[in-house]
Amino acid sequence: MTSTPVARPDEVRRHNRTTLLRLLHIGGPVTRATLANELGLNRSTIKTLVDGLAEAGVVEERVPRPGRGAGRPSLLVLPQPQAAVVLAVDIQVEHVAIAFVGLGGQILGRNSWNLHGRNREPGEVITHIVESATVLAGDLGCIPSGAGVSVPGVVRRADGHVHEAPNLRWTDIALGERLTSVLRVPVLVGNDAELGAVAEHLRGSARGSSDAVYVSADVGVGGGVIAEGSSLRGAAGYVGEFGHMVIRPGGRGCYCGSSGCWETEVGEAALCRALGLPEDTPRGAILVELKELAPDPEAAARRLAEFSEWLTLGLVNVVNLLGPQLVVLGDLFTMLPPSVLDTVTAAVRRRSLVSRAVGGTEIVPSSLGADVKLLGAAEVAFEQVLDTV
Amino acid sequence: MTSTPVARPDEVRRHNRTTLLRLLHIGGPVTRATLANELGLNRSTIKTLVDGLAEAGVVEERVPRPGRGAGRPSLLVLPQPQAAVVLAVDIQVEHVAIAFVGLGGQILGRNSWNLHGRNREPGEVITHIVESATVLAGDLGCIPSGAGVSVPGVVRRADGHVHEAPNLRWTDIALGERLTSVLRVPVLVGNDAELGAVAEHLRGSARGSSDAVYVSADVGVGGGVIAEGSSLRGAAGYVGEFGHMVIRPGGRGCYCGSSGCWETEVGEAALCRALGLPEDTPRGAILVELKELAPDPEAAARRLAEFSEWLTLGLVNVVNLLGPQLVVLGDLFTMLPPSVLDTVTAAVRRRSLVSRAVGGTEIVPSSLGADVKLLGAAEVAFEQVLDTV
């Protein structure tokens, strides 16, 4: 417990500058008047800040497209993407994607490759990330000042230690430290669902919602929580593992040592079983099957009845435990036939005591598509970087 | 998003004063030297603050008992309990307890009564609370400057609206507003498990733990979460309802409309069934039965095998979703035979992926006994009151 020290003027200026940059970075182009309003600062302070940033090439000002109002239009302040660039990395079970993301959140360039066999080893993945980032840096003519990495596993946020990423077969990998030592910039490593929640909160379906949960299914199932506007983490910076909530006692064995875990009933393999496909059906073929099912709600309801019930039950639990305003469904869940999603949503709202108390929890699909984890990884990198721009 | 304004000196002074009072209130008597250290302020600032508080009768200074060190002992600063008094109310299903709690957390006086039949109606309960508080105020010669109320139900923290307290048969009761209008002091109403978590965090088993969960069983089962040092609430200030996590799909029907809820398997009625007692066995008789079971771990394990399994499963889920450092078990759970609690703890640590990641979640009984919710109610009241002392 410490008291807030009195801020010195230069600290105040730096603080205001970072706050202004964050606003531009997340909110996009705005007028000086809006900035003054949102930041609670007077116009002359804003002018000084914006002029300083423009001189440093971090923002530019532009005449907006003519509006309907009379009078001189207020200049728009735009973030300059190249003024601050971060490396975002999304390590998935069968695939790695990297991107350079500029100030304002725009993806400036990207690359990706598949993982199979030996190149799934941590050392190989790290080497490939660094090589690929070097190529991108050359192509784009810019150097990232920080990096964020999404990993499908249990990650300690403080130092990026990967305790377990079972589907990658990674155990106890000092990923954060190893990447930091080769990239020579601050590296933040996060659990993929946690970073998905961050991205949805800042740029996606959960924008403006201070209490939201992101739940997503790929090979495994994960969840991230935004509570009172920030990312929720438990002890030692580990986030929860929604996929390992036991939902069906005595059910299928799970690699985690437990059985009946949620992901054994609503993960990719479970969806394949529900569709009558082999468990290792490639993603593309699953999507084709789901697409064919979509126009026939009755058939969809029938074939996915059990799958939907497990999805509903798990979501009821998530809502009853955490009381979010909004649940954002990601990845495979967004590809379910709309009629099935509607049924699940209605059932969760009906069956959850807490949903009824909060006046009906909203359940919506992710709006960020395949880039959600890349964007989340970029944002946690920007968090470290914005005050040094 | 707003910038931090520059603080004025009188605001800084008031802020430091409140921080110092909070430290004394929670931490108990300390020396000026410790205060200076903990608050990061110099000794002369501390002297001015303490002198001001002593003059106002909020603290007193006392020579500590002689220690081993040589030299003049540093004076101890003690909070004066009567300098700030709050009313704490714990509404339970069959019982209401009220207490006046003084600065420093001491219970200065208390009263309680049973609820049965007509006097369980909200109007009756409110009237009885006010009458009883008036008597206490007369006896103790002090008037509370705020009140905190614990309710076993779904409560909106912002205004103390009780959405549903099913075991009391209360629905949509404006408890906060109604109590505020008769007591004429700020009234904070909270869910009982949430306030239990607050109390355990500030004064009990979770002291010093920034990521803790409190789970308690009475008629129902509830849970409260401390995340990064503060109480976690979801949308609209509602906290989660752990007891309504579905743990046994297709299990017993629950009044919430769902079935297989955790509290149908580990609440008071479930414990009675496990012990072979009628579901409405009075608490005293349940405790006698549990006490007789305690010396025989084998018999305890056998009779409570199923109950323990459901308790374990639910705790695995809580740990996997929230990743706490510590789980504090409250109320009925603390009365289980120690051998059973040990078995449950070991099983949760073994079966939860997240517990393994954080190096083994600790699971401990509440140390605050029957007063836990009263103390939590007092603390949320003090939160509102300390800066006006």
Image: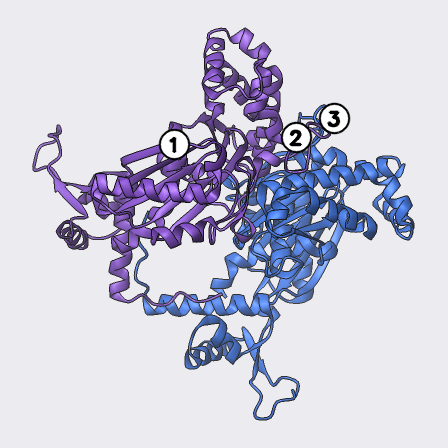
Chain colours: A purple, B blue
Question: Looking at the image, is A346 positioned above or below residue B350?
Answer: above
Determine the CA span between mark 1 and mark 3: 46 Å
On screen, residue B11 versus residue A333, left or right, reads: left
Label 1 resides on the chain identified as A
Q: Nearer the viewer, mark 2 or mark 3?
A: 2
Q: Residue A113 has which mark?
A: 1
Residue placed furthest toward the bottom = B71
How crowded pointer 2 is (Cα within 10 Å; few <14, some 14-19, many 20+) is rated as: many
Q: Which residue is drawn at 49% across and 20% down?
A: A282
Q: Which disc, if any, is residue A247?
A: 2
Q: Is residue B364 above or below residue B172?
A: below
Where is residue A313, by image quadrant? top right
Q: What element carries label 3?
A: loop
The residue sitting at 40% across, 30% down in the picture is A205
Residue A49 lies, in percent from the top left, at 18, 53
- Location of mark 3 (residue): B251
